[in-house]
Image (cartoon, rainbow, N blue to C red):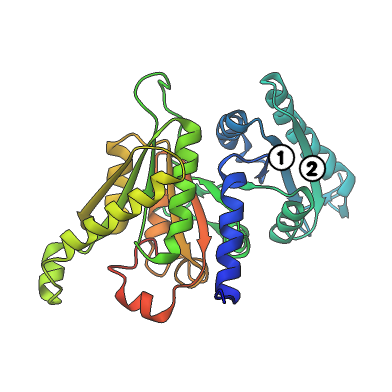
Amino acid sequence: MAETGPGTELDATLDAGIERWATPSVLLVATDLTDLDHLMPFALEQAAESQARLILFHALAPGTAVTMDPAGTPYYDLAGVASFASATLEHGCQTARRHGIVCDALVREGGAAHQILTAVRQFRADRILLATRSRSKLGRLLLGSVAEQVLRSVHLPVITVGPEAHLPADRAGGEPVVLHATTLRETSRPSAALACKIAAARKARLILLHVLPPVDEMQRQGMPTALDSLAMHEMRLLSAVTRTGCCLSVEPHVVHGNPAIEILAASAGHNAGLIILGATQRSTFQNMTRDRVIYKVLAHARCPVLTLREPLPHPAEAETAHFPAQN
């Protein structure tokens, strides 16, 4: 009898979603309106890739519709604030329609994270696109509670556009590149398969990256010297399994160093158009800044970052993992 249970059911759900995640039919763009100009070029590019419908979404948080009359008396002007938000989104939709993209503007009142998740279910969105911005004097990225709640709660790809992300200046020059950083855990297989499908759809080169700890750190901890060759062997196996699903050339790379630094360096060095990270709920989404790997990648990536929430690894698997990449 085939093994069944919560884990296998989740794996089946992930496998079933890979095709539609790679070529989405509905792309939900969650915006606070101030970031819409930064998001739109990426939204237009991704919608055009798969002829997806764009939904530009804004949630009116409680209290945002409170304004002042000329005498300084506060009053609730929901209609006025909603009208401004709708007009702003509609302007973005007009731009999309000029590119032949179906686009709808949607404004709802309520908590942003809850309303985003409700809209995802209602419109059966295949992908969420949102932005983060650096607001502090130290240049640190502030994800905000809304983004963190969305990242924790959805079982579909979330593409985050950081403050340093931009579209390639010369799209015709050079082969497109998709970079996928993997932990080599069994639970990372769905994100690797998704990366391959997306790369195939973009006619891009796929680079699989695995980061081992720095050599001196491995020596201090007495880690086996054969770990490099073992990791490369596993990467080649993963490459072989991955490419069979999308008939694409896959390049495995194993390096030593700080995961965030190496991911960013590889992305910049290969001029990647997309970084794909798979992460477990516990290590990333319940404690977004504990190890700050995703925090740093989102803050400094020059391209969008797609994050796919993966199932928690089994205890035995977690113990044998080479390093907690993407934590």
Badge 1 element: strand
Q: Which label belongs to residue 106? A: 2
Which residue carries the number 1 mark? 56
Could you tell me how many numbered marks the image carries?
2
Q: What is the x, y in percent for residue 240?
A: 34, 49
Q: What is the x, y in percent for residue 96?
A: 68, 26
Q: Quadrant of residue 225?
A: bottom left
- Residue found farthest to the front: 1
Side of 260 relative to 168 (left or right): left
* Residue toward you, 92 or 66: 92
Mark 1 burial class by Cα count in 10 Å: few <14, some 14-19, many 20+: many
**Residue drawn 42% across the image and 27% down it:** 168
Relative to 106, residue 283 above or below: below
**Residue drawn 15% across the image and 69% down it:** 217
Residue 238 visible in rendering: yes
Q: What is the x, y in percent for residue 55?
A: 72, 40
Q: Are marks 2 and 1 in contact (CB under 8 Å)?
A: yes
Badge 2 element: strand
Residue 129 visible in rendering: no
Q: Quadrant of the N terminus?
A: bottom right
Sequence order check: which comes first, mark 2 or mark 1? 1
Mark 2 burial class by Cα count in 10 Å: few <14, some 14-19, many 20+: some
* Residue toward you, 198 or 220: 198
**Residue drawn 86% across the image and 42% down it:** 80
Q: What is the distance, in whole Å, between disc 2 and disc 1 at their CAs?
A: 6 Å
Q: What is the x, y in percent for residue 40?
A: 61, 33
* Residue toward you, 235 or 325: 235
Amino acid under disc 2: Leu
Amino acid under disc 1: Leu
* Residue toward you, 157 or 118: 157
